[in-house]
Amino acid sequence: MSDAAGENWSRNIRYSADRIVAPRTLDELRDVVAASDSVKALGSRHSFTRIADTTGTLVSTAELDVPVQVDAGRRRVRVGGGVRYGELAQALEKQGWALANLASLPHISVAGAVSTGTHGSGVANRSLAAAVTGLDLVTSTGELVRFTEQDDTLAGAVVGLGALGVVASVELAIEPSYEIEQTVYDDVPLEAVRKSFDVIAGSAYSVSFFTTFQQDAYVDQVWRKQRTDAPPLPIPAALRDREASGPRHPLPGVSAAACTVQRGEAGAWLDRLPHFRLEFTPSNGEELQSEFLLPIEDAADAFDAIRALSPKLAPVLQVCEIRTVAGDDLWLSPSSGRDSVAFHFTWRSDEEGVAAALPALEGALAEFGARPHWGKVFTPRDPAELYPRWADFVTLQRELDPRGAFVNEYLRALGL
């Protein structure tokens, strides 16, 4: 039931806890949490910060006995918080159901993803957390607290940063299964992207831009994912005659073997919405990541500001992915209250180099009110400046965790 806590996926964090426990029943989970002075939930270890760290007990819910339960009448599914999205997607597809969107990696856990505001892409697609319609939390007293769609505080509990309790199960909205066609375009003219960003970003169900900021005239790749059950959208002029001649990986020169099928070949939603296939490990973890979300109308100006910093970023930047996220009403979602553009930076595994590059990048994006992804590398700042409901979240956290069992070093730096 326990072993050494070990490291996160990218190996830039070694957890401070002496052990990790993986309870199999809800009663075991409640007992472990109630008996721990300091405790945190540990998902699939894809966070790049100490958001999931503790000096006490780390709890994995991956082994928790919570079956996937589909309520077809309500179009809902209840699933254990520790289940990976790829596994949930397979279970849903077998029953003819789907989620509205997925992140680029299907390997991440449901609870970990929604608790940090993780997202996919698409101008009309909200974050993964916005699909949550219910939540079961084990609080620091061992009590099981259920949030439903009728609870006003559900919007505060979903992106909970692991500060409220251990997520035992999550209820999500679902829809009938559908297919996606995925096409990649190479060397898209940079000026066309700047001037027509909204047109290109809205030209398919999900669109991602990849750039190293090293080409003066081009954006390296554009990935378009279009639903086959929706009316076809015209291909923007900037993308015509630029379809990739073969499968592509987002990183230049890397084999596309781990990537999902491209070249416009239709396939099930779970096999196209992520960039990477569940059966492959997309990389060896030799990277760090940062991400910043800001109002979508500032996309071109933010792109220019980042591009101006390319000499400073180049030594540590592998690639930047640019995506769009529809706004939601979740208190701590990075896309809360505004349709957003997300700039996601995959860095080299160079902590000192990334730390040196971040201040200039964060300074350039501050004027746009950029909000960092909670699980990526960033410099902590007062969340009250970025989130109007921060004070309400602090109140909720105090109510659910009066003894501060879930407040760790990361959260204290944010003011909890």
Image (cartoon, grey):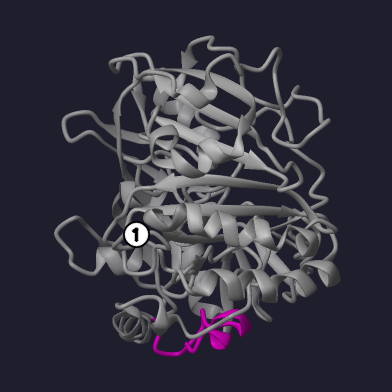
Residue 409 sits in quarter: bottom right
Q: Is residue 354 left or right of residue 395?
A: right
**Quarter in which the N terminus is drawn:** bottom right
- Write down the residue under mark 1: 136
Q: Is residue 252 above or below residue 405?
A: above
Taking 210 as reference, is 315 above or below it? below
Counting other residues with Cα less than 10 Å from the Cα at mark 1, is it few (<14), some (14-19), or many (20 or more)?
many
147 up-or-down from 67: above or below: below
Foreground: 204 or 151?
A: 204
State which region is magenta.
401-416
Residue 217: x %, y % from top left: 68, 38
Instruction: Say what secondary structure mark 1 lies in.
Output: strand
Q: Is residue 166 magenta?
A: no
Whether residue 105 is visible = no
Pick the residue in front: 60 or 233: 233
411 is within the stretch colored magenta: yes
Spot occupied by residue 349 in the image (x, y as percentages of width and height): 83, 58
Q: Is residue 206 visible?
A: yes
In the rendered image of this protein, does residue 231 appear above or below residue 196?
Answer: above
- Which kind of residue does numbered mark 1 sit on? Asp
Q: What secondary structure do most residues of the magenta stretch adopt?
A: loop
Q: From the viewer's perspective, is 280 left or right of 297?
A: right
Q: Residue at x 54, y 48 (%)?
A: 109
Residue visible at 61% across and 57% down in the picture:
22
Foreground pick, 248 / 60 = 248
